[in-house]
Image (cartoon, grey):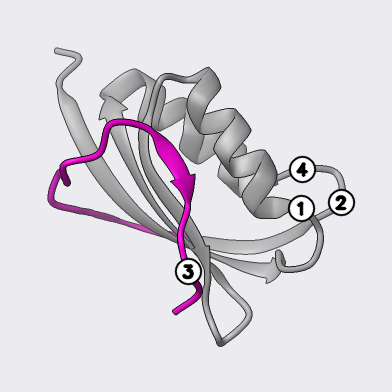
Amino acid sequence: MDEFIAKRLRVYGKVQGVGFRFYTVREALRLNLTGWVRNRLDGSVEIQAQGRTAAIDDFLHWARIGPDSARVDRVEAIEAQVEDQSTFNEVDTL
């Protein structure tokens, strides 16, 4: 079954200052996901992604590679609560 789910991701590597958030928003919108992306003070990127299971799976695959300008060393993904989001956008650094 292709249910609506949410995942919280932390992406580590060379993921800040390389357009990672821009490309994350673009990929999430392409997959019809809602949620947000933000830089973390430790140099990682945090993502809340919500959508159909198949789209989330595709997004996780993309996040493990990232855009050409980035170097992804690892991605941690956990189940998350679905938030009230109508689109996918960048939010303030935490």
> Which amino acid does the dot numbered 1 rest on?
Gly
> Which amino acid does the dot numbered 4 rest on?
Pro
Q: CA distance from mark 4 to mark 1?
A: 8 Å
Q: CA distance from mark 2 to mark 1?
A: 7 Å
Q: Dividing the picture into quarters, in which one does residue 49 lie?
A: top left
Secondary structure, mark 1, is: loop
The vertical placement of 90 against 82, above or below, is below
- Magenta range is 76-94
Secondary structure, mark 4, is: loop
The vertical placement of 64 against 39, above or below, is above
C-beta proximity under 8 Å, tags 2 and 4: yes
Q: Dividing the picture into quarters, in which one does residue 30 lie?
A: top right
Q: CA distance from mark 3 to mark 1?
A: 15 Å
In the rendering, which numbered label is found on residue 19? 1
> Which amino acid does the dot numbered 3 rest on?
Asp
Residue closer to the observer: 17 or 69: 17
Q: Nearer the viewer, mark 3 or mark 1?
A: 3
The vertical placement of 69 against 40, above or below, is above
Q: Nearer the viewer, mark 4 or mark 1?
A: 1
Which residue carries the number 2 mark?
A: 69
> Which amino acid does the dot numbered 2 rest on?
Ser
Is residue 90 within the magenta segment?
yes
What kind of secondary structure does the magenta stretch mostly adopt?
A: loop
Q: Residue at x 58, y 73 (%)?
A: 44
The mark nearer the N terminus, 3 or 1, is 1
C-beta proximity under 8 Å, tags 4 and 1: yes
Q: Residue at x 63, y 52 (%)?
A: 21
The mark nearer the N terminus, 2 or 3, is 2
In the rendering, which numbered label is found on residue 92? 3
> Quarter holding the C terminus?
bottom left
In the rendering, which numbered label is found on residue 67? 4
> How would you rate the neighbour count of disc 1 (Cα within 10 Å): few for under 14, some for 14-19, many for 20 or more?
some
